Image (tube, rainbow, N blue to C red):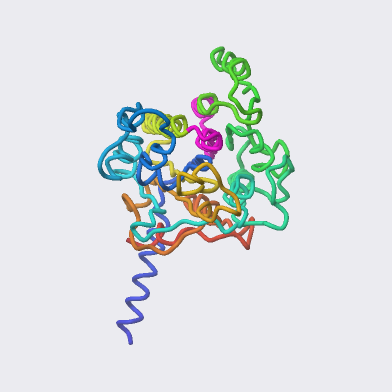
Amino acid sequence: MFKSVASLLLLFTLAVVAAGQGKTENVILITLDGARTQEMFGGLDLDVLKSKTRRGRVEDTALYKKYYAETPEQRREKLMPFFWGTLMKQHGSIAGNRALGSAVMTTNKMWFSYPGYSEILTGQAHDDVINSNDKKRNPYPSVLEFLKRKLKLDAKQVAGFASWDVIDWVAEHEVGSITLNAGYEPYDHPDPEIKLMGRLQSEAPTPWDSVRHDYYTFRFAMAHLKSYQPRVLYLSLGETDDWAHGGNYDKTVQALANTDRYLRELWDYLQSNEHYRGKTSIIITVDHGRGATPKDWTDHGEKVPEAQYIWMAFISPDIPLRGEWKNAETIYQNQAAATLCRFLKLDYAENNPSAGKPVGRLFAVH
């Protein structure tokens, strides 16, 4: 009996010590709109490419020559060499590959953008209220606003940059509480190059009225990061969804390749800066999935059940997990907000007691 009690006390002490050793002082949330599990875990989808190849052999297409390989692991590393070759091997882990017994799912049943982003940012699905992509103010405070309040930060210290203009409405319950820049909004920054980009984004528009090119979103976010060193940053990229809706597989795949280069540049900066190096935890995820076949890969929503399956990656100096999760219990989109807070030793239940809990596997005593 005594040994049992002593063992429990030892485990408790170890857990307390481990909890107190967190290195994280900054957090970054990154979302890739509608980026499918198929490309993330398997790279180039040959069936989709074949369906889009109208003339000649698929083997002669530029996309095949650049990104095809025999195995899913080889294909995904060709497409996203930094993510798979560096981040996931050396610094983080990823859940959601169902072929390995790991699943990540939404709890909302809408399976499109506003409900997905709201679930990520508030920690809870609200299908009865949030059931469209309309520009309506989110009635629920976001984790970004919670972190600003709890950490007693000014607006520049909690910043969000998004390609889709509706993120302005999703991420902020109280207007003006944090720094937000979305859609074609110019970013007010003293650097002349950034000012020029603010003009160019409208002079070189995308095919979509509400979504700018991810390049501008990333450049604005990096400018803010370097100038103000925020403790909380949200980067929301959109082209992986919009090119897919248009059936343009070449550009959808290229958007993922571009994102990999952005991740490399972001990571290199974080490692070069004393404020961030070894002190920053990152979550990368998506608002929804999309169809799994050549017939429905362009679509999502409640008529496309595959769209409820997503993925989530975690990079943190406090978490020893590496690579792909295998035979793991299902985790959910509504856990992202609480997990982000847990990295900072904060309890998100203070903001929303009904929110999903932190992802347990990340914080188990190792």
Does residue 138 show up magenta in the picture? no
Asked which quadrant contains residue 49, the reply is top left
Q: Position of residue 223 (x, y in %)?
A: 52, 24
Q: Position of residue 120 (x, y in %)?
A: 57, 50
Residue under the point 38% across and 60% down: 17
User: Is 129 left or right of 77, judged from the image as shown?
Assistant: right
For the question of whether residue 137 can be seen, the reply is: yes
The C terminus - image quarter? bottom left
For the question of whether residue 150 can be seen, the reply is: no
Asked which quadrant contains residue 269, the reply is top left
**In the orientation shown, which residue stands out farthest toward the bottom?**
1
Q: Nearer the viewer, residue 58 or 335?
A: 58
Q: Nearer the viewer, residue 236 or 154?
A: 236
**In the orientation shown, which residue stands out farthest toward the left?**
70
Image vertical order of residue 252 relative to residue 89, above or below: above
Q: Position of residue 167 (x, y in %)?
A: 64, 38
Q: Position of residue 155 (x, y in %)?
A: 64, 35
Q: Nearer the viewer, residue 42 or 175?
A: 42
Residue under the point 60% across and 39% down: 153
The N terminus - image quarter? bottom left
User: Is 245 left or right of 255, judged from the image as shown?
Assistant: right
Does residue 221 show up magenta in the picture? yes
The residue segment tinted magenta is 220-248
Image vertical order of residue 98 relative to residue 160, above or below: below
Number of residue marks: 0
Q: Nearer the viewer, residue 52 or 227?
A: 52
Residue under the point 44% across and 44% down: 281
